[in-house]
Image (cartoon, rainbow, N blue to C red):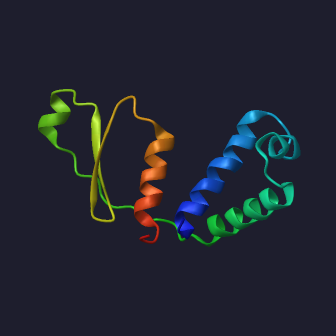
Amino acid sequence: MCSSELLELWRERVAAVEQSGATAKQWCQEHGIRPNLFYYWKHQLSRVQNDVPKADWLPAVVNERLAERGQDSITLRVAGAVIEVNSGFNPALLRAVVLALESEQC
C-alpha cells in the first residue's frame, strides 16, 4: 500500500469515527484498532492538510449550447484526467478521485 492509499484509508477511518457518534476509543475497540494508532494517524492527517498548498482556481469555460439545453453537468480537468460530474453525484467519491489524481503515483 503506497502512502497516498494509506492516507486515504485513515481519512476514511477518521471520518467514520466522526460520523458514528461513538468516541474514538469505542470505535477503535469495535474495529480492532489500537486507539494510539488512530490518534497518531489523525494527527498525521491534520499535518498533511495544513501543509497542502491551496489550489489555484482556473477560469470556468461555459459551453453555451449545453447551458441552453439545461445540461446539468460540469467537466473537470485534474492532473491530466477529464471528469464529468452530473447532478446527483457522490461528493465523497469525487473528492477521493481528485485527491488520488493529485497525490503521488503509486
Please name whichever residue, 31 or 51, is drawn nearer the observer in this view of the structure: 31
View extreme (front): residue? 32
Q: In the rendered view, does 59 fall on the left or right side of 38?
A: left
x, y percent for residue 31: 76, 43
Q: Is residue 12 left or right of residue 44?
A: left
How many marks the image carries: the answer is: 0
Q: Quick one: quadrant of the C terminus?
A: bottom left
Residue pictured at 47% horizontal, 58% vertical: 99
Q: Quadrant of residue 73?
A: top left
Where is residue 6? Give x, y as percent: 59, 62
Q: Quadrant of the N terminus?
A: bottom right
Q: Position of residue 91 (x, y in %)?
A: 48, 40
Q: Is residue 104 above or below residue 74?
A: below
Q: Is residue 55 above or below residue 89?
A: below
Q: Which image quadrant for residue 50?
A: bottom right
User: In the rendering, at what x and y percent does residue 43 appear?
Assistant: 76, 64
Q: Is residue 45 left or right of residue 81?
A: right
The residue shown at (70%, 63%) is 46
Indicate left or right for 7 with 81 as reference. right
Residue reaching furthest to the left: 65
Q: Nearer the viewer, residue 43 or 69?
A: 43
Residue at 39% x, 28% y: name it.
Answer: 88
Indicate whether 76 appears above or below 79: above
**What residue is rendered at 42% in x and 55% in y?**
98
